[in-house]
Amino acid sequence: MNFSKLSLTKEMLQTIDSLDYNEMTPIQAETLPLILKGDDVIAEAKTGSGKTAAFGIGLLSCLDVKTFRIQSLILCPTRELVDQVTKELRRLARFQHNIKILMLTGGESFGKQLGSLTHQAHIIVGTPGRVLKHLKKESLVLSNLKTLVLDEADRMLDMGFIEEIEKVLSFVPKERQTLLFSATYNNEILAISKKIQKNAINIKTTEKEVQNKINQEFYETNDKIDTLIKIFANYKPQNVIVFTNTKLEAKELAESLIQNKIDALAIHGDLEQYERNDVLVQFANKSCPVLIATDVAARGLDIKELSMVVNYDLPHAKETYIHRIGRTGRAGAEGIAITLYLDREMHKIQEYKEDIGKKFLDISTLKKEQGFEMQPQYVTLVIEGGKKDKIRAGDILGALTGDVGLQGSNIGKIDIYDRQSYVAIENLHVDEAYKKLKKGKIKNKKFSVWIL
């Protein structure tokens, strides 16, 4: 289980050690030797199992950095997952200078991506639609591709990406390594594997992986909003994702909760990329306790500690239920997964009743708490400056604790993007921080500041 047993460079091993990867996870131990050898692999591993590091270490180790051509392509189902995978790859890529990794997703400026591609890259991480658009425009050339990765393949099938993936494959060299990672196997996944892989080695580590500790509870109700508020009042979760089946319901539920003094934000497919960033940053930095999400957000959300997941609507498939609740109870923490269902949905509930460990409870056990509210611990300030302005987290922290006069304990998570930075400030101090930061400077420069 030790990384040093693999044929990795000293620099790569030092980088792995600096990231506190003490030993390989089951999926890494079983797939990495095969990936480094050049074999095709189809692997089943649950979310949070370390699969990104598995294929990331593999393809980075096989990279020819001096050849400035695209050598690896990673396809992901959502923009959030693309962002998460790219960040992980960049952390692993510290072992070698000049490794260029580019993201290609919808919702971002096509022209800006064209500009980045003219300077070439080593690795592309993208969604199938946007990658295909660049291939058709010939702004993306894959003639030097060595490795193709399909990450969360089952989710890409669920979202109807199969046709786009097949079109992307027509631009890819036939002689290549193909890695297919999926949280669940089904006949469709195996059929794709046969079509796009050569003598792929099947790896399944879900039984060896540490199972999330999740208390699964089901409630029959005819008033979902009232029941949801009672659940929040009884359990008082620090943060919670509530899943709905439609975009409209996500929007309406967020509005209803806000009217009931429960701070909530919705994320769904209709949001622009900047709106999605704003929502996800606020939820991740504890500026909003409740996130209402459609299944497009079920994967790729990098929330380390999530107290609760609620299925406000019954998922259409049991696999979706597994993906949803798998967001909580990670890294040894205990999570809660609540599912609400209507009387007319009783026939759909039967298959869940066959599973051991699920509790079917009466809503009368939930007490109503007068005046219950869920308000965030922090509020997010946005600074109109980021990586391109050479701003670092330490610069923002210094300005807030120095000129503004805040204590380090008053400041939460700091996220820095290319052109913007987000900083979580405790509720009581946000007005003071906003006024002083607006008048003051960061790194001797003035930046626009506003409250999100």
Image (spheres, rainbow, N blue to C red):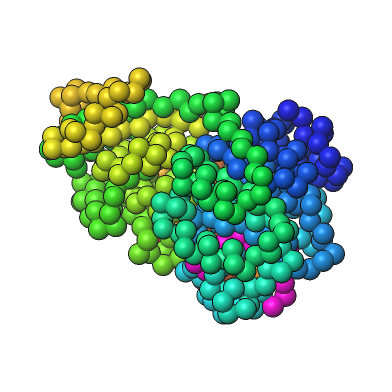
Seen from the viewer's position, the closer of residues 258 and 302 is: 302
Seen from the viewer's position, the closer of residues 226 and 47 is: 47
> Do we see residue 414 in this rendering?
no
Residue 373: percent from the left, percent from the top? 26, 40
Q: Name the quadrant containing residue 273.
A: bottom left
Residue that appears at 23% across and 35% down: 348
Instruction: Verify whether residue 128 appears in magenta.
Output: yes
Residue that appears at 17% across and 32% down: 346
Left or right of residue 167, residue 123 in this image:
right
> Do we see residue 5 in this rendering?
yes
Residue 93: percent from the left, percent from the top? 74, 53
Instruction: Verify whether residue 210 appears in magenta.
Output: no
Seen from the viewer's position, the closer of residues 350 and 279 is: 350
Residue 327: percent from the left, percent from the top? 45, 38
What's the magenta region?
Answer: 118-130
Residue that appears at 30% across and 44% down: 316
Residue that appears at 28% across and 54% down: 246
Left or right of residue 434, residue 231 in this image:
left
Residue 353: percent from the left, percent from the top? 27, 24
- Give the farthest residue toward the top: 356
